[in-house]
Image: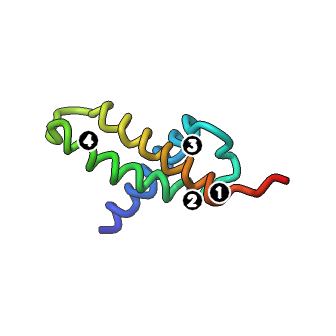
Amino acid sequence: MISALLWAVIGGTVIGLLGKLVAPGDSDDVPLWLTILCGIGGCLVGDYLYGLFFDPQTFGVDWWRHGWQVVVAAVLVTIAATLTGRRRV
């Protein structure tokens, strides 16, 4: 249980930062804690979506799955940047 939570936080941090890197627009205003949450969401939703279209049982590192996770995290970071962005006058 503890190791699964630890891996979710570590994986969410990596996927969230990669998602923030490839996210279009100004995502610099998104705090780190929200980036990590977007990364965890990207891992879970990206894994689910990948499983809908492809065989979820693969051998070795499944780079396509991680690509889906990063894309979903980028979408979530973009949404978070839009919702939490500062208003410019």
Q: Which sits earlier in the primary sequence, circle 4 or circle 2?
A: 2
Q: Amino acid at mark 2?
A: Leu
Classify residue 22 by image quadrant. top right
**Cβ atoms at labels 4 and 1 below 8 Å apart:** no
Residue 51's disc number: none
The residue drawn where x is 61% and y is 59% is 83
Q: For the residue carrying disc 1, how many other residues have a C-alpha within 10 Å: few (<14), some (14-19), or many (20+)? A: few
The residue drawn where x is 27% and y is 45% is 49
The secondary structure type at the circle numbered 2 is helix
Relative placement, left or right, of 40 versus 28 is: left
Mark pair 3, 1: CA separation:
11 Å
Mark pair 4, 1: CA separation:
27 Å
Judging by the rendered image, the residue that carries numbered circle 3 is 20
Q: Amino acid at mark 1?
A: Pro
Residue 40 at what x, y percent from top left?
42, 55
Q: How many marks?
A: 4
Residue 31's disc number: 1
- Relative to 37, does residue 62 appear above or below in the rendering? above
Q: For the residue carrying disc 3, how many other residues have a C-alpha within 10 Å: few (<14), some (14-19), or many (20+)? A: many
The secondary structure type at the circle numbered 3 is helix
Relative placement, left or right, of 39 versus 64 is: right
Residue 7 at what x, y percent from top left?
38, 55
Relative placement, left or right, of 47 versus 10 is: left
Mark pair 2, 3: CA separation:
11 Å
The residue drawn where x is 42% and y is 44% is 72
Judging by the rendered image, the residue that carries numbered circle 2 is 34
Q: Which sits earlier in the primary sequence, circle 2 or circle 3?
A: 3
**Cβ atoms at labels 1 and 2 below 8 Å apart:** yes
Residue 50's disc number: 4
Mark pair 1, 2: CA separation:
5 Å
Q: Amino acid at mark 3?
A: Lys
